[in-house]
Amino acid sequence: MPTAALPRAPESPLRRTVRQFMRQRSALVGLFIIGTLTLTAIFAPVIAPYDPTQVLIGVEDVRKREPPCIYLLGCPRDRPQHIMGVDGNFRDLFSRVVYGARVSLRVGFLTVSVALFVGTLLGAVAGFAGGLVDELIMRVLDVQLAFPSLLLAIAIVSVLGPGLINAMLAIAIVTIPAYARVMRASVLAAKAEEYVTAAHAIGARPLRVLLVHILPNAISPLIVQGTLGIGTAILDAAALSFLGLGAQPPTPEWGAMLSAERNQVFSAPHLVFFPGLAIMVTVLGFNLLGDGLRDALDPRLRHR
């Protein structure tokens, strides 16, 4: 006699999310890009052939700005190999681009972490408390949103002084309202659910309701927003560095490298092409990853 089929165990939310994520080809491309950049940043001392701040005058026979020299592409062996050439200060451009991944990823993750923490706190308090507290917090954030984010970041850095740390702080401040609004909307939606009503009915304290019952179910949109925000933060940091308000020489930051060589765009286009390409690929990777996470975490977009 055929045996009865055993009931299939329900799929866990985490496993279902991973399965949905793996179906997104664009998300896998973004994950590959971010993974490659992360490995590049970690192993930068191994990958880069030169110190990114080392001036090669006196080290090599360098008398002028050298174009890219790759032995496999026919570059003479009597010339030192520089895959991306030498910049205007006679430093190896490839080494600076590789180490720039460290700077940009650190800027993106630290900036978003600070903005995400503060924005989550403000949004959760505003959405859960409601009333006057909600009005006060959100109106202050609305005033901040009235200013263009990049102009506000420029104003903040101008007050604090140029530097990478101040640029990161400015970017974090101007992006707080975006995370606060997303969290507030998620908390308001979760407050209307029956499990929150049941938690209040059995006498759970408000703080426990917020931390145990609401926040875990309201965090998914913030994960997507934070992933997309990393790419935006890297782009904003590059813009501030391009204006001379972010990373200062000789820090190998992609925006600062673009700024230093912007006048050579026609005479030596490779000096601006490679840092610009690095920024574009990094931002693209985080955008693709964020879109994939959105599709995987939003039950309305899941394909069965």
Image (cartoon, grey):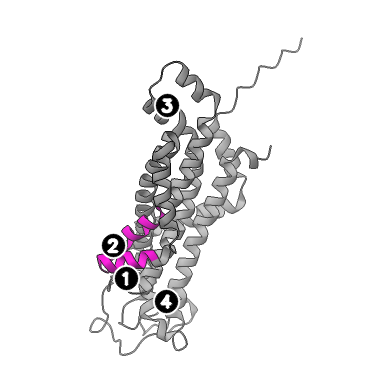
Mark closest to the chain's N terminus, 4 or 2: 4
- Where is residue 91 shown, x and y percent of the image? 31, 78
Q: Which residue is mark 1?
A: 245
Position of residue 126 relative to residue 107, above or below, is above
Q: Is residue 1 left or right of residue 268?
A: right
Position of residue 262 relative to residue 302, above or below, is below
Q: Residues within 10 Å of mark 4 (few under 14, many from 20)?
A: many
Q: Nearer the viewer, mark 2 or mark 3?
A: 3
Asked if labels 1 and 2 touch by Cβ distance under 8 angstroms, the answer is yes
Q: State the CA–CA distance, disc 2 to disc 3.
A: 37 Å
Q: Which residue is mark 2?
A: 166
- Where is residue 245 shown, x and y percent of the image? 32, 71
Mark closest to the chain's N terminus, 1 or 4: 4
Query: Residue placed farthest to the left in the image?
Result: 58
Asked if labels 4 and 3 touch by Cβ distance under 8 angstroms, the answer is no
Q: SS of the residue at dot 3?
A: helix
Q: State the CA–CA distance, disc 3 to disc 4.
A: 56 Å
Highlighted range, magenta: 152-176
Residue type at mark 4?
Met
Residue type at mark 2?
Asn
Q: Which residue is mark 4?
A: 84
Q: State the CA–CA distance, disc 2 to disc 1.
A: 9 Å
Q: Is residue 12 visible?
A: yes
Give residue 20's mark: none
Residue type at mark 3?
Val
Q: SS of the residue at dot 1?
A: loop
Mark closest to the chain's N terminus, 3 or 1: 3
Q: State the CA–CA distance, disc 3 to disc 1.
A: 43 Å
Q: Which residue is mark 3?
A: 209
